[in-house]
Image (spheres, rainbow, N blue to C red):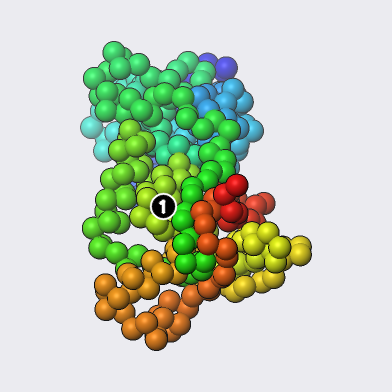
Amino acid sequence: MTPIDHAAIYDFANERLKQTDIDMSKSLIKALAEDIFNTYFKENFNSQTINLQGHLRSVVDNRPMADFENQRLWRDLKDRYLSVIESYLLDPMVKGVHKKEEIVPFFKKGENNPYWIEDIHCVDCGCNIKVKKKGDTYSNDLKEDEEEYWVYVKAAQSACKFPEGVGHYSNVIDVPSGKLIFSNYLLNLFDRELSITSDKYISKISGYNNSITSDYGVKLNTEFWNKLKVIYIQVGNTSPSLYQHPKTHEITCKINKAVKGAAKKGKIDTSVWAVFGMDYNEFIKLCKINGKDIDNIEEEFKPVIIDVPAGKYDVTSYNAAKYDDQDTFFTIKAVK
């Protein structure tokens, strides 16, 4: 690590400020902060390592910043540097109230402040990670006794629950009618409060504020609605197709290539970024409760209806909505 000469940085900035109107615009301040970062801090910054205890799939752990240059995590942490340069150095200089011997130690303290934090969202477990600089490492391994402030982010200080990703998971749905109905949206058959309840369920089971912006949140949301006899799978804005194998009756929801040996049963236009499904008789019952016109379900729900032998079925989600290299969202197979 190259030692940082904060006084030299002050002199560099001072020369640049002399060349411009002292009442600099925000854009000029930001440009100067960028120059200071690139000239004095970038080399050290890129040599520092990251340890997020398995968050973000462990792909960053114990690797240098240089490996992630211009990626989101690198940019987020770099922005913190730029903020310090602006707040602790350039702003006081532009205001002209303080002298060099006051600004330099103030700037040095800000640059070495151990309680820098940035919110980094782990797309696997859903934690908003609090990261601080510890020596030559950026880490979320924080201790409660270091600062009372950290108590409320205790969950985000721990290792990720899913360092290898959430993976696939299954729920069982009963299909006594021998028909499954799929649509882009079925929640209008339920009390609106249930959507709020599902959000609370996700956070309660997680043990921290979580939502369907994470794979774990998606899993818990699917689990919540399964208890209400509903298939609810996040698929992104993909408009996937549904296929069924003629012999096994297995159903596959996917995009891109067709399923070998299976018949295409229909396509779901996903303006809501999800596919919903349920037993057909359960659907009809809810339609009647909600005053829906049974003869008009085609227009309102644009459903895909698939016949299957009556019984219980495993609905396996492959959590593929966020990954470009995965094209199968879920499969439905008879419980053996």
Check the image and name the residue furthest to the bottom: 295
Check the image and name the residue furthest to the right: 261
Q: Is residue 175 left or right of residue 197?
A: right
- Residue 189 screen position, x and y as percent: 32, 68
Question: Residue 216's image quarter?
Answer: top left
Determine the residue positioned at 64% across, 33% down. 67
Q: For this rendering, which residue is in front, 47 or 28? A: 47
Q: Is residue 242 left or right of residue 263?
A: left
Give the number of marks: 1
Q: Is residue 173 left or right of residue 168?
A: left
- Residue 21 screen position, x and y as percent: 36, 48
Determine the residue positioned at 57% across, 18% down. 2
Residue 150 sits above or below residue 17 on the image:
above
Check the image and name the residue furthest to the top: 145
Q: Amino acid type of disc 1?
A: Asn
Question: Residue 165's image quarter?
Answer: top right
Question: Residue 249's image quarter?
Answer: bottom right
Q: Residues within 10 Å of mark 1 (few under 14, many from 20)?
A: some
Q: Which residue is mark 1?
A: 226
Q: For this rendering, which residue is in front, 231 or 202? A: 231
Give the quarter of the figure containing the N terminus. Answer: top right
Residue 20 sits above or below residue 141 on the image:
below
- Residue 241 screen position, x and y as percent: 61, 68
- Residue 265 screen position, x and y as percent: 62, 73
